[in-house]
Image (tube, helix red, strand yellow):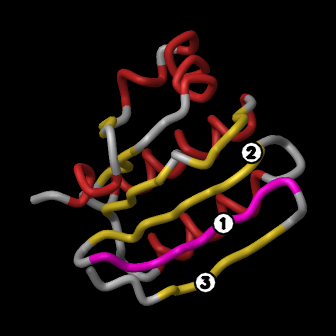
């Protein structure tokens, strides 16, 4: 598995790791995704799309909280990725984040996977 780290960011309550895996850009936010930290996730997602990576895998296994601002970051990335011929795949969601997607109906517009490995499988 090629996990050459592309970059990472940290602002106290949220850390974001990014790497390229085959034809996908994998983004792993860890901590709390909210109004104060959303740009730490939107930046790497936008950068991946700007580099022509339209298949984005977001590893949510370490995402402990997501508010409406965080959800809007994911939804915005999905629209941009789909416009570029790709999509956003969410993997390994903790129940608290899965519940946000469920009650908002957003789970219906994402491709969901149990693990990052499942999301990266052909």
Residue at which label 1 appears = 16
Numbered disc 2: secondary structure: strand
Residue 87 placement (x, y as % from top left): 32, 51
The N terminus, quarter of image? bottom left
Q: Mark 2 points at which residue?
A: 33
Q: Earlier in the sequence, mark 2 or mark 3?
A: 3
Quarter-wise, where is residue 53 in the image? bottom left
SS under mark 3:
strand
| Residue 7, label in figure | 3
CB contact under 8 Å: marks 2 and 3: no
Q: Looking at the image, which residue is at 37% across and 35% down? A: 110
Front residue of this view, candidates 113 and 73: 113
Q: Where is residue 114 in the image (x, y as percent from the top left)?
A: 32, 38
Give the left or right position of residue 39, taking residue 121 as reference: right
Q: Position of residue 52 (x, y in %)?
A: 36, 78
Residues 63 and 55: in front is 63
State the separation of the CA atoms marked 1 and 2. Answer: 10 Å
CA separation, marks 2 and 3? 18 Å
The relative height of residue 96 versus residue 12 in the rendered view (above or below) is above
Q: Which of 63 and 43 is in front in this view?
A: 63
- Location of the C terminus (image quadrant): bottom left
First in sequence: mark 1 vs mark 3? 3
The image shows residue 53, relative to residue 91, as above or below, that is: below
Taking the magenta stretch, the answer to whether it contains residue 17 is yes
Residue at x-position 33% and y-position 35%: 112
Q: Is residue 85 left or right of residue 5?
A: left
Left or right, 92 with reference to 99 = left
Q: Residue, x 33% and y 47% (percent of image)?
A: 115
- Kindly report the secondary structure that dominates the magenta region of the rendered protein: strand
> Where 70 falls versus 46 (above or below)?
above
In the rendered image, residue 110 lying in the magenta stretch gets the answer no
């Amino acid at each position: 598995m090629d996990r050459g780290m592309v970059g990472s960011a940290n602002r106290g309550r949220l850390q974001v790791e990014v790497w390229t895996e085959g034809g996908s850009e994998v983004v792993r936010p860890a901590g709390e995704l909210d109004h104060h930290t959303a740009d730490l996730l939107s930046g790497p997602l936008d950068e991946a799309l700007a580099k022509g990576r339209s298949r984005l895998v977001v590893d949510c296994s370490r995402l402990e909280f997501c508010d409406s601002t965080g959800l809007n970051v994911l939804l915005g990335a999905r629209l941009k990725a789909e416009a570029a011929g790709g999509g956003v795949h969410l993997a390994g969601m903790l129940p608290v984040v899965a519940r946000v997607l469920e009650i908002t109906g957003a789970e219906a517009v994402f491709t969901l996977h149990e693990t990052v490995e499942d999301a990266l499988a052909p």
